[in-house]
Amino acid sequence: MKLSPSDREWFDKVLRAIAAVEAGPTEKDLADAPILSDWKAAISPGGHVMLWGEVTDHPLLGNASIHTSQLIAIDPEAGWARTASRWYRLGRSIDALEAELAESMNGKAKLAGSFQFALPGFANINDPELLQKLLTAYIAQVRGIDAADRSASGEEE
């Protein structure tokens, strides 16, 4: 399999993001990262896993409602995510917002789950284990395509 130059460029970008995740974010990476609040993982109509939400201080988009490029890794407990393009600091998730809204409605626990937000055309990923499996499978797929391309090009891995 031989990738086109534009596809090769994309795979190189994703491979750099994977390497960054494996090294882990530095304090500077996170200090410089935009903040994504009211976020949720989702699958795009094209089958790509990404995050959507409200971004603050994005270097290209400023403050806006966005969906990210391909998600590579996420650690909600540590408060970060890495996409093909950049690191994000994670603010409140949309799940937390939904719970806060339900609680604010007279504090009735029976309203939990009554509020659900979605990005039209995208399928929310509600299972953290499924999300991790999808990301692991994507990384394996990228590495396999990279290896096949390098082999077809006569390059060593």
Image (spheres, rainbow, N blue to C red):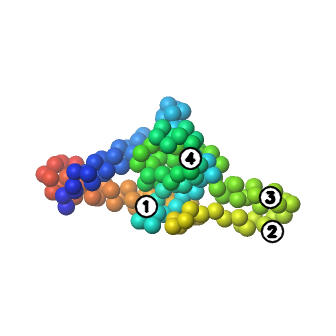
Kind of residue at disc 1: His
- What residue is disc 3 on? 103
Relative horizontal placement of residue 147, taking residue 93 as reference (left or right): left
Q: Residue drawn 80% across and 68% down?
A: 110
Relative horizontal placement of residue 125, taking residue 95 as reference (left or right): left
Within-10-Å neighbours for mark 4: few <14, some 14–19, many 20+? few
Q: Residue drawn 55% across and 38% down?
A: 57
Q: Earlier in the sequence, mark 3 or mark 1?
A: 1
Kind of residue at disc 4: Ala
Task: For mark 2, give the secondary structure.
Answer: helix
Q: Earlier in the sequence, mark 4 or mark 2?
A: 4
- What residue is disc 2 on? 110
Task: For mark 1, give the secondary structure.
Answer: loop
Kind of residue at disc 2: Lys
Relative horizontal placement of residue 57, taking residue 84 as reference (left or right): right
Q: Residue 156: x and y, percent?
A: 18, 48
Q: Earlier in the sequence, mark 4 or mark 1?
A: 1
Task: For mark 3, give the secondary structure.
Answer: helix
Examine the image and state in which quarter residue 3 appears.
Answer: bottom left
Report the Cα–Cα distance between label 4 and label 2. 33 Å
- What residue is disc 4 on? 64
- What residue is disc 1 on? 48
Q: Is residue 60 above or below residue 114?
A: above
Within-10-Å neighbours for mark 3: few <14, some 14–19, many 20+? some
Image quadrant for the N terminus?
Answer: bottom left
Q: Are marks 3 and 1 in contact (CB under 8 Å)?
A: no
Within-10-Å neighbours for mark 2: few <14, some 14–19, many 20+? few
